[in-house]
Amino acid sequence: MIKRLRIPKIGTICEINWLDASGKMKEELEKINDVLPSSLLIQATTYGEIYKVDDKAILILQEKSDTECDYTVIPISWVINIKNLKKKNGN
């Protein structure tokens, strides 16, 4: 059974729990040759504003200034859950 994810409205500040895994060093790759890829997934948490959504991904805006911004794009299929913290207007 596939869990249906309810994505908050654009502008809502949220906590998003999702699955992620990454590695950077070649030595790490050699150590994980005999490991199932799914065993390397960890639960990550991202906080930010729901900025844009399509049927495959959510763009979370974490910081924005006049000259730059910081955001994360998360595939919807990787999301475990989303908790609303507050709407942009303060509610």
Image: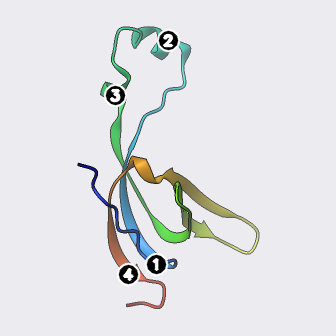
Q: CA distance from mark 1 to mark 2?
A: 42 Å
Q: CA distance from mark 1 to mark 3?
A: 31 Å
* Quarter of the rendering occupied by the C terminus: bottom left
Q: CA distance from mark 2 to mark 4?
A: 42 Å
In this figure, what is the number of numbered marks? Answer: 4
Residue most extreme to the front: 1
Residue kind at label 3, given as amino acid type: Ser
Residue kind at label 2, given as amino acid type: Glu
Residue at image point 48% right, 32% down: 22
User: Mark 1 or mark 2: which is in front?
Assistant: 1
Q: Earlier in the sequence, mark 2 or mark 4?
A: 2
**Circles 1 and 4: CB distance less than 8 Å?**
no
Q: Residues within 10 Å of mark 2 (few under 14, many from 20)?
A: few
* Relative vertical location of residue 41 with respect to residue 69 in this rendering, above or below: above
Q: Which residue position is annotated with label 4?
A: 86
Q: Position of residue 62 (x, y in %)?
A: 53, 65
Residue at image point 59% right, 59% down: 71
SS at mark 2 in the image: helix
Q: Earlier in the sequence, mark 1 or mark 2?
A: 1
Q: Which residue position is annotated with label 1?
A: 9
Residue at image point 52% right, 54% down: 56
- Numbered label attached to residue 72: none
Q: Which residue position is annotated with label 2?
A: 27
Residue most extreme to the right: 67
Q: Which residue position is annotated with label 3?
A: 38
